[in-house]
Amino acid sequence: MEALISLLVIIFTSIVINKFAAAALTRTGLSRDVASFQAASAFSGVGFTTSESEYVVSHPVRRRIIKTLMLLGSAGFSSAVATLILAFLGRTAAQAAWRLLWLGVGLLFLYWFATSPLVDRVLGRIIEWSLDRFTDIRVVDYESLLGIARGYIVSSFRVSEGSWLAGKTLREAGLREEGAVVLGIYRRGRDGVMRYIGAPRPDTRILAGDELIVYGPEEVISRLSRRLQGVEGDREHEEMVAEQARRLARERLIEEEATAPQVEG
């Protein structure tokens, strides 16, 4: 029974480690979903692809977190397998069935622990306090900061050969006129290494195969990612420019109403 309890403790500890790591990655600017996935991927060693690892390890703090997770995950997996074998080794059929039942109950509890919103709230407070107390990783709520809940998003997409953007400079594309801003470009060099161009200049040329990181209205970015070269692409650009002009007019009206002096009755 000691081996079975040890196995459940190992799994419980792994879940807590992943939650701590996800919270720490969130503090480096990753979204909660991405941070959770990257933490689980690094800890388990499953699904941590080359493109994802290049994105995450480009940040020194993220790199340290991921490295620690990989080391802990490697040791934890080996310990869990060894403990599982010891839990059932040399047991009678009845004993094995009884321990299998307890293992199932324990795994169900751990599943609830890992997915429960209540546990996330309580444990989240403890994790945030611990990170504030023992680390200097700064929390930034980028979703609120960038107005994600108000129809604006940060998204990425790859530029295809026939894309309307391919071959244009940022100035020629006129994306700001549509309300979209290119925050950065991932580009693979001749040596095959993916490099990041941060805050690209207006004369930066967009190449087929580039991955653009774009901020702006969700509809604009969605249509931009699918826009093809030709007359239809030019017409859609003009439509998006007109829509952005109307959007700016609405925002200007809101601003004027908010700053207008109030007339006392």
Image (cartoon, helix red, strand yellow):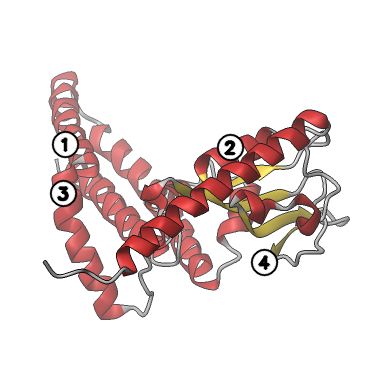
Q: Which residue is more in the foreground, 172 or 222?
A: 172
Image side of residue 173 versus residue 184, left or right: right
Cα gap from disc 1 to disc 3, whole angstroms:
16 Å
**Rendered view: 1 above or below 228:** below
Q: Residue at x 24, y 37 (%)?
A: 87
Cα gap from disc 4 to disc 3, whole angstroms:
38 Å
Q: Which mark is residue 123?
A: none
Residue occupied by mark 4: 198
Cα gap from disc 4 to disc 2, whole angstroms:
22 Å
Residue occupied by mark 1: 106
User: Could you tell me if residue 171 is visible in this image?
Assistant: yes
Mark 4 / mark 3, whichever is N-terminal: 3
Q: Which residue is more in the foreground, 261 or 123?
A: 261
Residue occupied by mark 2: 222
Q: Position of residue 205 (x, y in %)?
A: 83, 56
Type of amino acid under label 3: Val
Image side of residue 32 versus residue 169, left or right: left
Q: Residues within 10 Å of mark 4 (few under 14, many from 20)?
A: few
Residue occupied by mark 3: 119
Cα gap from disc 4 to disc 1, whole angstroms:
47 Å
Which of discs 2 and 1 lies nearer the camera? The answer is: 2
Image side of residue 70 versus residue 144, left or right: right
Mark 1 / mark 3, whichever is N-terminal: 1
Q: Residue at x 82, y 34 (%)?
A: 229
The C terminus: image quadrant: bottom left
Q: Are marks 4 and 1 in contact (CB under 8 Å)?
A: no
Type of amino acid under label 1: Gly
User: Could you tell me if residue 154 is visible in this image?
Assistant: no
Label 2 sits on a secondary structure element that is helix
Q: Which residue is more in the foreground, 216 or 260?
A: 260
Which of discs 2 and 3 lies nearer the camera? The answer is: 2
